[in-house]
Image (cartoon, rainbow, N blue to C red):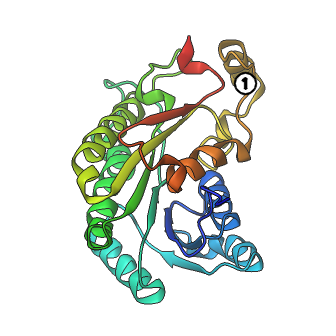
Amino acid sequence: MRNPFDLSGKVTVVTGAAGGIGGELAQALARQGADVAMLDVRVDELEPARQQIEAQGCRALPLQCDVTRGTEIEAAVASILEHFGRIDILVNNAGVASTGSVEELAEAEWDRVMDTNVKSIYLMSKAVIPAMKERKAGRIINLASICGVKGSKLAALHAYNASKGAVVNLTRGMGATLAPYGITVNAIGPSLFPSRMTRALYQDQFLEQYNTLCPMGRPGNPDELNGAVLYFASDASSYTTGQTLYVDGGWTAV
């Protein structure tokens, strides 16, 4: 019986791959047989993931890329197509967070969050969709957040709320219009997971408050997003598009 999660021969692009979540997702995809192009501004930090992916018998291509800049994305995508010959799966994982209410946030900080969390998805998707349309197949997976559908009781995260809400609805719109081309577009909505971005939150007072509010009473573990990304990347989700799967310990259920 064929394994619907088998990604052998597929080529995946993961943005923000030097972060904790991006690196974990890249390796999870490789464990199912996918070759992986890893994009990040910190290209030197991609080396451990490259070694681990290649040790599993898959190919890895680390590339330096600022995903808020269209010219850098175009150059990266051209390199990926030259190296691998195709792009089957795009994981738009790059993201930043910022605390502050609308009356506190500087305009430059608002722009930084929106550019990294939303504009990067627009630019990356715009760059890879033509190749996917040509093959009449593709998977685009966006990283949203519980903050895209919930306000935060623990801190003002207004720019982050706005950006992740945009990701949720952009996913719906793209999923609806790209479906006729064999391209699915879905999102994953994590709650608190360990990463470079959330490192400052892992302190006793914040964690105590978070654990009290979260039905499961704890943050997510690094590998607990893997099932969601493998589902959306594989044939198992061939009739699923425009959806956001919240991997959140029950946070959005209450």
In percent of width and height, residue 99 lies at 47, 32
To which quarter of the image does residue 129 belong?
bottom left
What kind of residue is marked 1? Leu
Label 1 residue SS: helix
From the viewer's perspective, is residue 103 above or below residue 110? above
The picture places residue 252, in percent across and down from the top left corner, at 53, 19
Evaluate whether residue 40 shows in this view: no
In the rendered image, the quadrant that contains the N terminus is bottom right
Q: Quadrant of residue 110?
A: top left
Name the residue: 59% across, 31% down. Answer: 191
Left or right, residue 33 beside residue 218: left
State left or right for residue 203 relative to residue 100: right
- Which residue occupies 78% across, 25% down? 204
Residue that extends furthest to the bottom in the rendered view of this protein: 82
With respect to residue 237, does 140 lie above or below?
below
- Residue 208 visible somewhere in the drawing: yes
Q: Is residue 130 left or right of residue 104?
A: left
Residue position marked by numbered label 1 in the rendering? 207
Considering only vertical position in the picture, is 231 above or below 217? below
Tell me where residue 224 sits by quadrant.
top right
Report the residue at 38% width, 27% height from top.
158
Image location (x, y in percent) of residue 119: 30, 52
Badge 1 local density, few (<14 within 10 Å), some, or many (20+)? some
Query: Where is residue 4 shown, x and y percent of the image?
Result: 60, 55
Give the residue drawn at x 50%, y 77%.
63
